Amino acid sequence: MEEDLEPVTVIERKDVPVGFTLVNGLPDVGLVGVLAVSHLVSSLDMEEVGSIESETFPPLVVLHKGLPRSPIRIFLKESIVAVVSETAVPSGTVYGLADAIVKWAGSKKAKMVISVGGMAVQNRQNVVKPKVFAALTDEKLIDLLGHSAEVLGEGYLVGPYALILKKCYDSRIDGVTLLAQSFYNYPDPEAAAAVLESLEEIAGIRVDVSELLQKGEEIRLKAKDIMRRTQEEMSKMSKSHEYEVPPLYR
Amino acid sequence: MSRRRRRGSSDIVGRPLKCIEKRTDDVFGAGWDEVACCIQPLSNVTVGSEGLTITVDLPLADEGEVAVKVCGKRSVEVYARTKHTVRFDDLGIKHRTGEFTCYRAMLDLPEAVDATKLTYEMKRGILEIRLPRSRQEPPR
């Protein structure tokens, strides 16, 4: 069935060395992934090295300092590579995008593929410190979590991270999806900070999250438009399925 | 004989106008009303066993300057002043000029509510409104 996937291409504009740890920040619940990975990119002063392109994406560019940029870009710092999207990923392109990311990670012998995102909880406003949950491709990765995240035992995952995790599993690439408790349709910088703290324990990627917390209100306001568009795409993907209880186990 | 109702002039003019209005809303309706200096917030309405819970995301809102009003039985108006004037420039947007001093939203409700039992509170920038169902209308 892979031939039927819409073509999505990873373009390397600068040489990306093999054996990196890949961190994905795609728009999803609470925009946790986008906020976390954008903060990671700016904190580590990561270099833009490529982008992900497809004719199936909306015809748009993001202007930064007057220059046109792809909305889904790839950044590098030493052995860390980050993929971050500044636009909602259309539900129809999710398969192609996940396929392209995992194939590229495989071709570059990625050490691990970590996707960071949110998991909506009711009464999020009463949760002071969001918990982080993890879905893994291999039981051996549980030891890496330490106290930073709890294994997501049973449940559904919906959206690009679900496909990335499954494709990593099928391709025998170590994959971890980290999901912090978050708002469903409000940008959640506190959840982004929580997931970055887990990332430090799992992958040794240390980032100061204080700015993310201090500027939280501004970030929420600035991100509200992409949150609105992301919510529309999440509805098309039946994201609410994630909050249902699976009938079978094992 | 045709029984089709003749369209009045207001229908003929009104329909395309509504269409244009909607398209204008599509373009400029991203939630920043530069004319009224208002931001349209993100919001969420949940139906529970006791009634409706509405949350509204109000970052940078002054918690002491929030007003909630039930309009009729099926809509709620939310107004909140921002702590300070928010400019597009502050958000890194140079090609648009606009200053925003408040949030305003008119939210449609899926069920009739009892306006006399309205309660609301702000928690860390999120407004939570609770409205029990109207007694006349049994739960669906």
Image (cartoon, coloured by chain):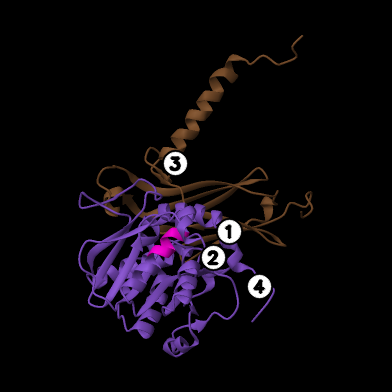
Q: Chain of mark 2?
A: A
Mark 1–mark 2 CB contact (< 8 Å): yes
Q: Chain of mark 1?
A: A
Looking at numbered disc 2 in the image, what kind of residue is underneath it?
Val
Viewer-side residue, A10 vs B71: A10
Circle 1 residue: A238
Mark 4–mark 3 CB contact (< 8 Å): no
Q: Which residues are magenta?
A: A95-100
- Residue A99 colored in magenta in the image: yes
Q: Chain of mark 3?
A: B
Q: Are marks 3 and 1 on the same chain?
A: no
Q: Which chain is brown in the picture?
A: B
Circle 2 residue: A158
Mark 4–mark 1 CB contact (< 8 Å): no
Looking at numbered disc 1 in the image, what kind of residue is underneath it?
Ser
Say whether residue A68 is visible.
yes
Count every numbered label the image shows and give the total: 4
- Residue B3 colored in magenta in the image: no
Looking at numbered disc 4 in the image, what kind of residue is underneath it?
Pro
First in residue order: circle 2 vs circle 4: 2
- Name the quadrant containing residue A31: bottom left
Where is residue A79 shown, x and y percent of the image?
26, 78
